[in-house]
Amino acid sequence: MKRFAALFEALDASTRTRVKTDALAAYFREAHAEDAAWAAWFLTGHRPRQAVPSKRLHLWAAEAAGIPLWLFEECFDNVGDLAETIALVLPPPAHASDLALHEWIESRLLPLRELSEAEQKARLLGYWDQLGGTARFVFMKLITGNFRVGVSALLVMRAIAQAFGVESNVVAHRLAGEWSPSAAFWKSLVDDVHAEADRAGPYPFFLAHPLEGDPQALGERDAWLAEWKWDGIRAQLIRRGEATALWSRGNEPIAGQFPELMADAQRLPHCVIDGEILAWRDDRVMPFAALQKRLNRKNPGAKVMAEAPVIFLAFDLLEWEDEDWRVRPLTERRQRLLDMLHAIAGGTRFRATSPLPAATWEGLALARAQSREHGTEGLMLKRASSPYGVGRPRGDWWKWKIEPYTLDAVLIYAQKGHGKRASLYTDYTFGLWNGGELVPFAKAYSGLDDAEIREVDAFIRANTLERFGPVRVVKPELVFELGFEAIQRSKRHKSGIAVRFPRMLRMRKDKAPSQANTVDDARELAGWENAA
Amino acid sequence: MTQLIESTARGLYCAAGGFHIDPWQPVERAVITHAHGDHARPGSAHYLCAAPGLAVLRARLGEGASIQAVPYGEPIDMNGTRISLHPAGHVLGSAQVRIESRGETWVVSGDYKLEPDPTCAPFEPLACETFITESTFGLPIYRWGAPASVAASIEAWWRANAEEKRASVLFAYAFGKAQRILAGLDASIGPILVHGAVDAMNAAYRESGVALPETKLAIELEKGFDVSRALVVAPPSAQGSPWLKRFGDYSDAFASGWMAVRGQRRRLAVDQGFVLSDHADWPGLNRAIEATGARRVLVTHGYTAPLVQWLAERGYEAAAMQTRFEGEPGAEA
């Protein structure tokens, strides 16, 4: 545990990729297999379910620290993180422990969930007295199920590759998908380079960068493939050996949510394809809200499936007849993809994207301007000769999204942020006018720089009208231009509308609150009839 | 009980003695607890400070200021009130002000800490009926580790950077924190360079008889001076300034009590945070308050409200006292 805590400190302290990779590689080289497996499991974003309810942790930590609950809450409010608050308020440990990471996890953390409340408490108080500083913090992050440190899964994979001289792609492939952290798994990961097990794991997803500025800068139009950017669930379908699997970009297995896709997938040959799952009806994409009803719902009933029928719109082929095709040029992969899908008699729910025909960048710009009519978020531009890369290297894949919708709204509520922003008011709720009153319509956290955050934070502290727990009601004075991607009807929101991906574009110091937009303006933007 | 000291528009005021303590507006007679900018402001007609703090207060107020210095513990009479200054352990020359009038004793803590510090006299607990305490770190999340282990981790960081041939830039308040860090350092690791603001305070410390290792003023380095093994001590205001360019690809760190909280550490975007403060931590505040035997505690700058409530629940007559002191810069308002 001490070593893992020291690794956490090193990763947390540095912003340099090389330093992080070296620290990770050194840890993986030195750690025992069972510890390394758990470390890799956590560092690649896996989390155990929360072992003990937060409410109990608050109560017990206050008791162990010898402080009243209100004072613990005051501390929590200032720190912004439960695990860290607990680590800080407790006195230093009386009996330091040398137990290894995997023992802390397997014989202490994991069994906690099943214990009675009294037994949980007795054990936790004992554990707190055995861990100091960062180790206590890390253990509590694992218990609360929100362990996070500034490394990407990709970096972890690179570090493992570096530590054991294995190819980064191979590590990435083996770590993608579902695996359990055991010594046996770790050995198969780092020892045996060639035995590609018949696993049903996905490849790491290749991600695009946002295109800023003019696409002319990309060079010849002919060298690029353009297609719509669809707003669905990015997924890989795996057909390999006996296995058929469907993975989301977060490496979640999602086959259970889409039985109709899995049934059709049986008709596909051995392959791995990448695409977007979309709710689709009458040859048209349905709003994202329709697809949302299908998410996190295993074995959906016939009614749900009929209300939001889905297709898999494939745009790339990564593996063909058990051979890795990712290094081949995009055009070749796509040709194989089209041939494969066309060869299936009667068609399936697996379709291929169609490239946009416009022959010039100007023509594409016109197409992009019609994205909303097609229910898309803009365009994807992919270099025709590009391989399917790992992660997000710049240069080959660009997303050229449409300009967001914008509205001017008034800041009405504020709450403190988390992590780096724990002591600042950074989480804002904005209101639109609706007959003389401001009704909340969107929350936004991002878009301001540090100086603006400080300025708004100071304004909030000086202009609080009321407090409800952590929420401050703020004097309606500051106007912000908000950007967002889509407007949907919502019964849950007082304004009757919900927006997708809201963020702050800028402060409108030139505008008085009375000049902010109204709910009717938002409805008009969405193209709905106004009731009035 | 009477109100021997009250907070007025000009500062903490003792009407019986006719003097202010650390006033924020110019007054006739100012008793100064220590020379930090939020406690020692220019413009008053006469100042009184503890003798060990004379040089640093002079450096802050200038040659023209009228300053009377008294040794720690030596009582003086002002309008029939008896006042004396006692070590607060905060920085060189820092003092608690003890005021006795008609059989009643008040103590104003100024800023204080209980941990050992080689650059100043240790905090002296004083019995009193009313104690006016700071509360900069008045939450139970603030618990300082042993200063020796903080010093060891600073040296370990410096040594590791030196081995990688990178300069180590350490941000610390120019008055107090910087000298406290310098005083205990193992100077064999490499040269120690300082910013001008730190250098000015170093001079005042040396003049006062505090031993510090040899330091060089960074702007006076000869051309081609090898900074790759150097420790650079600079005030926080130097962060992000072009002054730092001369140190190449350096590693940076910040020494402050605020570094105890990860969010604060990350917000400053430095490589390392060292938890080192010249203010009392939570256990320290509680121990100091208890040691006074005071029944009444008035709480100034910091986490005032929670400390007041905590003390009230423990049977003290506790209240907040408004001041314009700032505690350790970097705190949220």
Image (cartoon, helix red, strand yellow):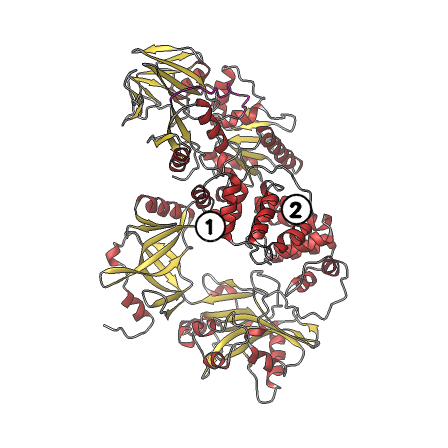
Residue drawn at point x = 70 percent, y = 74 percent: A322
In the image, what residue occupies the spot 28% across and 26% down?
Answer: B8
> Dividing the picture into quarters, in which one does residue B300 lie?
top left
A501 to the left or right of B21: right
Percent coordinates x, y for residue B239 in the rendering: 48, 37
> Callout 1: helix, strand or loop?
loop
Q: Which residue is mark 1?
A: A418
Identified at 71% across, 58% down, the residue is A182
Query: Which residue is nearer to you in this view: A162 or B262?
Result: B262
Q: Quadrant of the C terminus of chain A?
A: bottom left
Report the residue at 61% width, 78% height from top.
A337
Q: Which residue is mark 2?
A: A1
Chain letter for the residue marked with disc 2 in the picture: A
- Considering only vertical position in the picture, is B230 above or below A267? above
Q: Amino acid at mark 2?
A: Met
Residue nearest the observer in this picture, A321 or B89 = B89
Please tell me whether residue B118 belongs to the stretch shown in magenta: yes
Q: Is residue A51 above or below residue A333?
A: above
Residue B181, position as x, y percentages in the image: 55, 27
Which label's residue is closer to the chain start, 1 or 2?
A: 2
Measured along the vertical axis of the image, is residue B175 above or below residue A206? Answer: above
- What label does residue A357 carry, if any? none
Mark 1 closeness class: few <14, some 14–19, many ≥20 residues within 10 Å: some
Q: Is A505 contained in the magenta span?
A: no
From the viewer's perspective, tell me whether residue A339 is left or right of residue B13: right
- Chain for mark 1? A
Q: Is residue B14 above or below residue B303?
A: above
Q: What is the CA distance from the residue labelled 1 to the residue labelled 2?
A: 25 Å
In what element is the residue under mark 2?
loop
Where does the image place residue A74, in percent across and percent down from the top left? 43, 43
Q: What residue range appears in magenta?
A: B116-129
**How dense is the environment of label 2, judged by Cα within 10 Å: few (below 14), some, or many (20 and up)?**
many
